[in-house]
Amino acid sequence: MAKFNSILIANRGEIALRIMKTAKGLGYRTIAVYSQADADAPHVKFADEAVCIGPAPVGESYLVPEKIIEAAKHTNAGAIHPGYGFLSENADFAKACTKAGLVFIGPSADAIEVMGNKAEAKRRMKAAGVPCVPGYEGEDQADKTLIAEATKIGFPVMVKAVAGGGGRGMRLVQTAKALPAALKSARSEAQNAFGNGDLLLEKAVIRPRHVEVQVFADMSGTTIHLGERDCSIQRRHQKIIEEAPCPILTIEQRAQMGAAAIEAAKSINYVGAGTVEFLLDTDGVFYFLEMNTRLQVEHPVTEMVTGLDLVALQIKTAQGEDLGLCQDDIVLKGHAIEARLYAEDVAQDFLPVTGHVDVWKAAEADGVRVDTGIATGSDVSPFYDPMLAKIIAWGETRDIAINRLRTALAQTRLFGVTSNKGFLVDILDTKTFANGEATTAFINEEFAELKPVDVSVRTAAIAAVLDYENSARSAQTKSLGIHGELMNWGSSGALLSHYRYTSGEDTISLTVTTNEAGHYKVQCGEEILNLTVLKRDALECVLEIDGARLCVGYLAGDTGCMDIDVEGHVMNFRNQCVITNLAHEIGGGGRVVAPMHGTLLELFVKKGDMVEQGTRLAVLEAMKMQHDILAEISGTIVECVGVQGDQISANDLILTIEAPDTEPAKT
């Protein structure tokens, strides 16, 4: 095997950065590839060299083998590391690398090909004596055959695509009557996703655990396992929480599962890092599920309990070196848990979202590791996987690891784009997870109804106090003759500051008064809270609320906008009092401008229309909320600049109203 001193990483985001950090630490020159959408991405800036390989769509950049190999030749790279996803399990790409004289840091193309087809993989595993779920993986794909085989297996059955993953082409079928429709939809989905509509059938294992074993092999034939990971907590058949070791696996079960995983790898002459996935049923019986012929997203938990760097081992074995390890060298120490931070709307069935990262600040603490590919100012585009980061915590015990991870999630600051951060905290807070009892049915059972977090008066009060302090500081900075400490004071005592917040579908009205700097009384209806600001910096504030101390994250935006992060749950507050006032102040009555950035969703008037004060002129959609724009004066519409459906910026002119018997408003 040829030696190399430079590595091109055929990937993006957090995995590209993670690979580069190890490679650089070992003295290798690192080369990034990037699409036009990723030109300013952290992995591009971190690499020693970088090559643009095309437009944003993956089919024109990251999934084009010829472009990546050309980039490797152009930069004199000696090896290519595919990361995970994209071309990592593409046998043709592995062959093309070898043909081009490049070392592919991964298994052989033959191994990838065998395990890339779930049906062929199961046939191989059965021949090797690895326990498999009863099912059908034959080549006859006629519906009649599949229906007959499903009847033999017995319902419920799982219908699965033989290619690909991520839950696509997968259906749980409870009855024979529902099978034909499931076959049709699964086949169509698989064909569209993977270019292969072939299916296999398996006996449905109800409420299993998803347990996988990390294997490693070198070219000399040494094959070992590095323990297991429990990846049972999933949504849409995709993992979001992983841990090592599995909290219920016995020493004997670990040895048996590890031996089966090693046998699976040896049966296909495997080299490098691989993961053999199993289903563990309620009786403790395990079945082969599939083998991933690459590094896994969740590999950090294995690294934290073994003390090994899996990427370093990949590079080592790819150059033909021996692992230098035997099975007895692998000792699992402590416990590690990983949470995947996604840009997604949990309340909308985990719908992926796009947006701008206004603030990113990863938590820093003992036993905590954060792998990410974003930074403050990054854009989350629709072209790539919405995973933003992986937050991993290690502890001497599982309880310590849970506590550290929960604290790390709560202290991670992410503003601008919607994420699942609060949901991850909620998972860790359940008794089921704390007791180590979660199965693949966990989310459906524990979170049957997903809905937005209810906005509490306490959180709205925090937003109002921070909003108030911002106004005080702004007034002081602008030297308006009002000291921040004395704002809202008159000759007869304290005056009220009014806030009418919208957050999601909730509206909360509050008043704030203060008698001395840092001390506030907030009233909402009959409820009164006393707040004291103890410490505050640009992103965090320590408060005392009726005697209880709390640290919150916050981001003060423009135009009465305040984002509050309490224990990992981020809530967006918009002060309608300020928004309405700003529109009036900036517009000057006749000039109607956008009070904030957003989409001009509807425009109800046109040039020449007569309007009365208070007429609904337009609707602006911003931050997933709709804001009515009302006429501040009566008159005639003399100019319409805004176009329905357009993105507009704060203070952009929408239209002009001319009041009766006045000169036309100048624009």
Image (tube, helix red, strand yellow):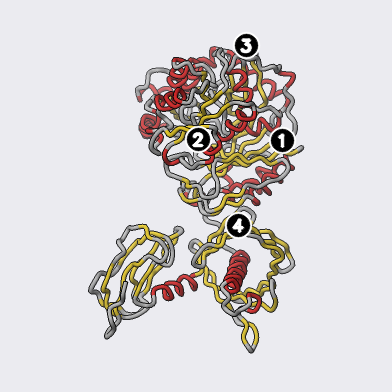
Q: Label 3, secondary structure: give it.
A: loop
Q: What residue would you read off at disc 2? A: 12
Tell me where residue 553 appears, x and y as whole percent: 62, 57
Q: Amino acid at mark 3?
A: Gly
Mark 3 vs mark 1: in front: 3
Q: Are marks 1 and 2 in contact (CB under 8 Å)?
A: no
Q: Amino acid at mark 4?
A: Asp
Q: Are marks 2 and 4 in contact (CB under 8 Å)?
A: no
Give the Cα separation between the discs numbered 4 and 3. Answer: 51 Å
Mark 1 vs mark 2: in front: 2
* Quadrant of the image occupied by residue 492: bottom right
Q: Is residue 488 above or below residue 502?
A: below
- Closer to the camera in the image, 538 or 224: 538
Give the residue drawn at x 44%, y 58%.
624
Q: Amino acid at mark 1?
A: His
Q: What residue would you read off at disc 4? A: 565
Q: What residue would you read off at disc 1? A: 335
Tell me where residue 361 appears, x and y as whole percent: 61, 49
Mark 2 vs mark 4: in front: 2
Give the residue drawn at x 45%, y 72%.
582
